[in-house]
Image (cartoon, grey):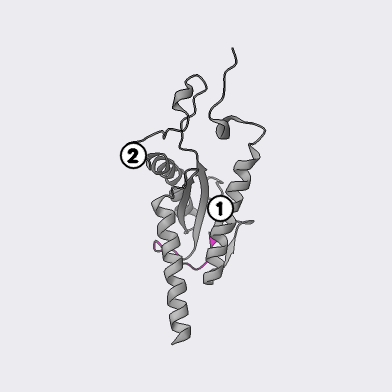
Amino acid sequence: MVTVQWDHINSCLHHASNWTCEHDHALRALERICNDTGFATTHKRVLTSEGNRRADLEIGKIRVAQQIDLLVDVNLRHNFIGAGQIGQHQGQLRNPDHPDHILESAAADKIRNYRDAYRRNRHVAFLPAFMSTSGRIHGELLRLIFFVDSMCVCVCVCVCV
């Protein structure tokens, strides 16, 4: 009997590099949004934390959470079930009653592992930037995009007046 792997995006070793490509695409998009607003960013030489953890993006002089710089860790999550043994579950959300659960729990884990280590050692703010393969965006990332966008509007209004 052949077992079909319904959750192909999570289980296929041949396509595993797609995760890296999508991660890098999301990282570049966020960096471009910040750069277009006038914030300096770096993603190659991001500060390490006390425990030698490394975020993906550093946004300089953004001034959030009582810190000057912000470190962002971009992450993608797959929120559909795909059990090879039970094919009828293909395409169902892992938590249909609370679809944001996968993003919230992953962000909470990332915050627990990164935020204090950065704050103690580097005095920078830390933000998890989580998205799902279904198009959901975690609230922290949405707030950052809104904040950066509102800074762009303020700059444009000041320049135009």
Q: Earlier in the sequence, mark 2 or mark 1?
A: 1
Q: Which residue is mark 1?
A: 26
Q: Is residue 124 magenta?
A: no
Q: Position of residue 54 (x, y in %)?
A: 56, 49
Q: Is residue 61 magenta?
A: yes
For the residue pair 15 and 51, the one nearer the viewer reads as 15
Q: Position of residue 22 (x, y in %)?
A: 59, 47
Q: Position of residue 108 (x, y in %)?
A: 40, 43
On screen, residue 1 above or below 36: above
For the point 49% across and 54% down, which residue is it? Answer: 121
Give the main secondary structure, helix, strand or loop, of the magenta stretch.
loop
Helix, strand or loop at label 2? It is: loop
Amino acid carrying mark 2 in the image: His
What is the quadrant of the C terminus in the image?
A: bottom left
Amino acid carrying mark 1 in the image: Ala
Pick out the residue farthest to the bottom: 161
Pick out the residue farthest to the left: 97
Q: Which residue is mark 2?
A: 98
Res. 50 in view: no
Q: Residues within 10 Å of mark 1 (few under 14, many from 20)?
A: some
Pick out the residue farthest to the right: 14
Instruction: Kindly report the distance in space between the C-alpha atoms of the residues bearing marks 2 and 1.
Output: 24 Å
